[in-house]
Image (cartoon, helix red, strand yellow):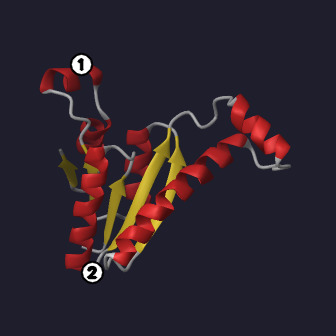
Amino acid sequence: MQRIVAAVDHSEPSLRAVRLAADLAGKYGAALVLLTVVRDAGAPDAGMEAFAAMEHIHEPVPALHIEAARDGLSALRDSLMQQGSAKVTVEAAAGDPAEQIIGFARDDRADLIVLGSRGHGRLAGLLLGSVAQKVVALAGCPVLVVP
């Protein structure tokens, strides 16, 4: 096992998944990628647009959302590295979370995807459909779902 992708949405299940992924990465000497996905980063955001204008930032707002999400993972990465994880990187994407996780893992040639469950019961999960269920069903590598 050389590459592990841990999907992070900052929920408690996803943070448990990150801790487990870091442990696995350490045991296997694997690289760990923390991936977060911003939903609808292209949707208009008046607050972000006003901030960008005020600060004379000329990047498109969707790029700012992605960069902010990536920055949000930096503290988590630093914490993992202080605990002994050597190869931890952060990535962020925009769009449908399941599609982005699957696509990133495929493109990054991940050996394992680790993600948290949303905590829905079986019936609610079937009716709502969850990111975890979609990733499990469609990923091209093993997926570990942490409750």
**In this image, 11 relative to 48: left or right?**
left
Say what secondary structure mark 1 lies in: helix
* Image spot of residue 73 (x, y percent): 47, 58
User: Which disc is residue 119 wearing?
Assistant: none
Quadrant holding the N terminus: bottom left
Q: Is residue 133 visible?
A: yes
Q: Earlier in the sequence, mark 1 or mark 2?
A: 2
* Image spot of residue 29 (x, y percent): 27, 80
Quadrant holding the C terminus: top left
User: Which disc is residue 29 wearing?
Assistant: 2
Within 10 Å of the Cα at label 1, are there few (<14), some (14-19), or many (20+) other Cα atoms?
few
* Image spot of residue 27 (x, y percent): 19, 77
> Is residue 84 depicted above or below 138 in this figure?
below
> Is residue 73 depicted above or below 42 in this figure?
below
Q: Is residue 108 visible?
A: no
Say what secondary structure mark 2 lies in: loop
- Comparing 86 with 31, the one in front is 86
Q: What's under tag 2, amino acid-wise?
A: Gly
**In this image, 20 relative to 91: left or right?**
left
Within 10 Å of the Cα at label 2, are there few (<14), some (14-19), or many (20+) other Cα atoms?
some
Residue at which label 1 appears? 127
Q: Residue at x 38, y 50 (%)?
A: 8
Q: Residue at x 66, y 42 (%)?
A: 62
Q: What's under tag 1, amino acid-wise?
A: Leu
